[in-house]
Image (spheres, rainbow, N blue to C red):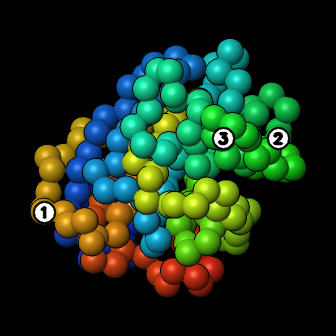
Amino acid sequence: MKFLLALIGLLPLTSAIGMRCFSWNDRINDTQVFPLENPLKVGDVIYVSAIASMIPWATHFVLDLYEGSPTAQTINKNVSLRIMANLDTSEITFNTITPAFSYLEEPKTSPISRSFQFKLKLLVRDNDYQILINLKKVFYTYNFRRPSLNIVKAIGLQGIMFSTRSECLPAYGVKSSRDSQTITVDNGNVYYLYGPTLQGANTAAYTNTA
């Protein structure tokens, strides 16, 4: 387990007691959805290390946090948080989407550029998502727009590729609903790491060590 964590740049998480892995599919300009075995909760982390797409018609990098289990009909209707970086205009937006309303935020200048490697970390806190991109400081803090966090049960990703790929390792350990989880997208795989406490305090600022 320590070797795996070192491989994907998360050696501080050596308290992890469980791991699941799913391979990334090289579908063009299509959102790939990965269900969460445990609903998202305070203390969980999502980490993406990838290259923004080189393909001209893949215009955006998108990370979605879905409420419930999305279908083809509901995939754009129940999104707790959508991070969307336009690879042609250098703008990034943060949004919540519901059947009745969408809470669009002011666009910011995006540090995510087409064909370049980027690293994104998202920490779930008591009242917000804390987002870091490339830098060792917080890029954006997005307050919850929805009343319940634990309905986030899937993530979606679009507009990324990988410089290297590795084989998924077999599932490791036994998870509990009480475990914290870190979802890591790296080396062509999506890893779910479980443990009693994988990250820092619920309300303290999270330090990017990548």
Q: Residue at x 35, y 42 (%)?
A: 35
Q: Which amino acid does label 2 sit on?
A: Glu
Q: Is residue 126 in view? A: yes
Q: x and y percent of residue 27 in the render?
A: 45, 19
Q: Residue at x 48, y 57 (%)?
A: 46
Kindly report the distance in space between the C-alpha atoms of the residues bearing marks 1 and 2. Answer: 41 Å
| Contact, mark 1 vs mark 2 (Cβ under 8 Å) | no
Q: What residue type is labelled 3?
A: Ile
Mark closer to the chain start, 1 or 2: 2
Say which of marks 2 and 3 sits in front: 3
Q: Which mark is residue 174?
A: 1
Horizontal arrangement in the rendering, residue 18 relative to residue 36 (left or right): left
Horizontal arrangement in the rendering, residue 19 relative to residue 48 (left or right): left
Q: x and y percent of residue 164 in the render?
A: 41, 37
Say which of marks 1 and 3 sits in front: 3
Q: Is residue 117 in view? A: no
Q: Would you place residue 179 above or below residue 39 in this image?
A: below
Q: Would you place residue 41 above or below residue 183 in this image?
A: below
Q: Which residue is drawn at 70% across and 61% down?
A: 142
For residue 11, which quarter of the picture? bottom left
Q: What residue type is labelled 1?
A: Val
Kindly report the distance in space between the C-alpha atoms of the residues bearing marks 2 and 3. Answer: 19 Å
User: How dense is the environment of label 3, judged by Cα within 10 Å: few (below 14), some, or many (20 and up)?
Assistant: many
User: How dense is the environment of label 1, judged by Cα within 10 Å: few (below 14), some, or many (20 and up)?
Assistant: few
Q: Would you place residue 32 above or below residue 172 in this image?
A: above
Residue position marked by numbered label 2 in the rendering: 91
Q: Residue at x 79, y 45 (%)?
A: 104
Mark closer to the chain start, 2 or 3: 2
Q: x and y percent of residue 182 in the render?
A: 39, 61
Residue position marked by numbered label 3 in the rendering: 97
